[in-house]
Image (cartoon, rainbow, N blue to C red):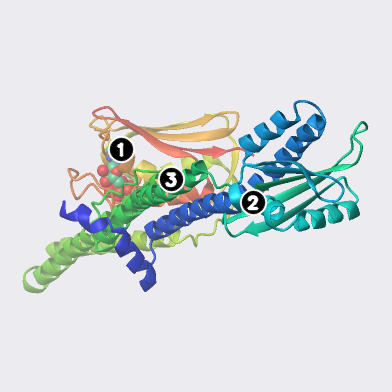
Amino acid sequence: MKRSSKSRKSPIQLVRDTLKGKRGINTYVWMYCMLFVILVLVTIWLLQYVCLSNYYRSAKISSISQEANRIIQAYGTPEQGHTNRTIAYENSMCIVITDEDGNPLTSENNLGSYSRLYDDIENNYSMYIYKLKNELMKASDNCYTVTFENDELDAKEIIYCAKIYVDEAPEQAYLFIECTIEPIDSTVKIIREQLIFVTIILFELAVIISVFISTRVARPIAKLTKTARRFGEGDFNVKFEGQGYREAEQLAKVLNDAVNDVRKVSDLRKDLIGNVSHDLRTPLTMVKAYAEMIRDLSGDNPVKRNEHIQVIIDEADRLSNLVNNLLELSKLESGNMELDLKKFSIGEKIEDCMTRYQLVIEQNGYDMKFEPDEDREVTADPDKLDQVIYNFINNAINYTGDNKVIRIKQINTEKAVRIEVTDNGKGISKELLPKVFDRYYRDAKVKRDVVGTGLGLAICKEILKCHNFPFGVRSEEGKGSTFWFEIPCE
Ligand code: ADP
């Protein structure tokens, strides 16, 4: 509860943050949402006040001219009086028809005493109407309009003047129509009042929705940041979660992959330090112990002394082997390895590697055989490949079963030469299988005298990766393992 109230910001806090200059993604989303709503509202109000009156005005003028036509058509007919009355009533108009001198022939007033035409007839001997008539005479059209502000009615008005030509009539007549051209009726008032309510409601809704959206957008990022902070503080057991939208999920996935990599590296580093220090300490302890023995006990006994010196030499060899392997691996992993590519016979290379084990095979009774295919020339760095084959064979010898059978196979395919080194030892468990090529991976159950440095396969992996040769291992617990790699043919 406490946490969520902390992460959710009120609009006031958002505004404060904005003013302080520390704008977060939610502030931006909130700001843009509000801006959008304000723009929508401004547009509606503009439409209501500016465009509506213009639209109303042009609609009104076109309706006046239509009504004027109706009046002109009815002029001189028996329906004239009725038509004029109806039109004046329906449209709140003052309609006056005058003769050439401006004297009213007929009039209908539905604007009350505020009508300018009516006032002119009543009080000014039709002076204003006479003036309008003169203007109409000068106009190129048959009609002439004048707009003005009627202060008494508090509205804009229009006077539409038109000539009436009737063949049968004894003289020319003139039509004058006065009416307001602004929406002054109650519907418009109600619409305007409602618009105020709509604005208030819309504004409140916009605030709520924009705060909701902005917190929803920002929440996954805030969550990711929080997790990243924990990760930065050294907690590698974090899990990034980015539910909400695709980008956040993708970011969470990338970060989780990075965490896994960092966790692996960290575990490896810990293992490496533990293993290296252990493997350095053990031979050093032996060297010291045997050196002391020679000094104190066996110095005068040549047989014992030589035995002890041999132990010191063996342990020194183990130490230098470990250091060499570490150096080799770090060189390989730093990407500084340069391959000295040459063409050579793969069969000869394997046989050459095997001869080095001849003595060990004879002394310990190993059944090691090479099953060659048709000889092929391959392109690789011979010394580096030698290291790989040597390591695979060495491991097969170290981990083979009691029948001591080891098989090295060359299998030619159309596109590659595949080399397999198989032993029938105790095999590797399914859980450990994916890790055997990892640096310093070592089966904990294996005895110290058997194993080397735990770096051999990691070195093989780097060499094969550098050559772009596919490689791998098949193994079944209790049955044995097969380590393989393929050299693609050109
Ligand atoms: P090491 O110097 O310990 O042999 P490697 O990197 O060559 O180091 O091998 C890593 C680990 O993989 C070994 O410690 C062993 O547990 C396992 N391993 C390697 N080859 C075999 C094999 N042929 N049979 C069973 N386990 C093996």
Q: State whether residue 296 is above or below residue 225.
A: below
**Image location (x, y in percent) of residue 68:** 76, 38
Does label 3 or label 2 sit earlier along the sequence? 2
The answer to whether marks 3 and 1 mark residues whose Cβ atoms lie closer than 8 Å is no
Where ligand 1 lies, by image quadrant?
Answer: top left
Residue at 77% from the left image edge and 32% from the top image edge: 70
Residue at 32% from the left image edge and 50% from the top image edge: 260
**Image location (x, y in percent) of residue 247:** 43, 47
**For disc 2, does the CB lie below 8 Å from ligand 1?**
no
Q: Residues within 10 Å of mark 1 (few under 14, many from 20)?
A: some
Q: Which mark is residue 194?
A: 3
Provide the residue designation for mark 2: 115
Q: State whether residue 363 is above or below residue 119.
A: above
Please state which amino acid type lies under the numbered disc 2: Ser
**Image location (x, y in percent) of residue 464:** 47, 47
Q: Which mark is residue 433?
A: 1
Q: State whether residue 426 is above or below residue 303.
A: above
How far apart are labels 3 and 2 at the CA level? 31 Å
Question: Which circle, 1 or 2, is nearer the viewer?
Answer: 2
Please state which amino acid type lies under the numbered disc 3: Gln
The answer to whether marks 3 and 2 mark residues whose Cβ atoms lie closer than 8 Å is no
Question: Which circle, 3 or 2, is nearer the viewer?
Answer: 2
**Image location (x, y in percent) of residue 323:** 32, 64
Which quadrant holds the C terminus?
A: top right
